[in-house]
Image (cartoon, rainbow, N blue to C red):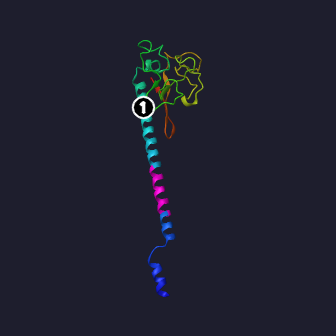
Amino acid sequence: MGQCRRMNRRGLTLVELAVGMAVLTVGVLSFIQVLVASSRAERKNNELARATQAARQILESIDAEAFAQAFRRFNDTGADDPGGANTAPGADFAVAGLSAFPSDADGFPGEVIFPTLPNAPEALREDVADAALGMPRDLNGDNATDAANHATDYWILPVLVRVRWRSASGPGLYELKSVIGNY
């Protein structure tokens, strides 16, 4: 009888094989989940890098303009463009590799935002309430915050460059805020 017990211990039982296969399956599935999550994270990081680079390039373009024309070249209307109607880049811009939301009217994921009213994009205003732009604030250095159009006499220019895009992993958003000065 002692010899029979030894013979049974030499091989694996069906239960031991089933448990081993279950543990192996759980391990393989966990590894696959890690790979999928890593791929998603890499895609999100690449999208964010594209958005960041595009926003910085636009902000550098605004900063490189003749200061007195920066607002008019990158605001949300083409009617006041310094070189004639619709000759400037404007407020909306494409970002390579990123798609705008279907509900985005202009079809571009990038936009430049200045302190203006929605119905008057050609008027740079000191009295606009916009915490993201640090508004209201004195833009022309006269120590007053008024409701006048300061599109031609500003000394500082608050700007927000926003990129919003859609991807398989969900919505993306990147914002770059700055104040450009003419001192």
x, y percentage for residue 125?
56, 20
Q: Main secondary structure of the magenta part?
A: helix
Image point 52% across, 27% down: which residue?
104
Magenta region includes residue 27:
yes
Q: For residue 90, which quarter of the picture?
A: top left
Q: Position of residue 78 (x, y in %)?
A: 47, 16
Residue 174 drawn above or below residue 85 = below
The residue lying toward the viewer, choosing from 80 and 96, is 96
* Residue at 46%, 83% in the rendered image: 6
Q: Which residue: 40% across, 22% down?
A: 65
- Amino acid beneath label 1: Ala
Q: Which residues are magenta?
A: 22-35
Q: Is residue 155 above or below residue 50?
A: above
149 shown above or below 64: above
Mark 1 neighbour density, 10 Å: few (under 14) some (14–19) many (20 or more): many
Q: Nearer the viewer, residue 11 or 61?
A: 11
Please report the residue visible at 46 percent of the width from the left and 49 percent of the height from the top. Answer: 36
For the image, the number of numbered tags is 1
The residue indicated by pointer 1 is 54
Please tell me whether mark 1 sits on a helix, a strand or a loop. Answer: helix
Foreground pick, 86 / 73? 86
Q: Residue furthest top?
A: 84
Where is residue 142 shown, x and y percent of the image? 54, 19
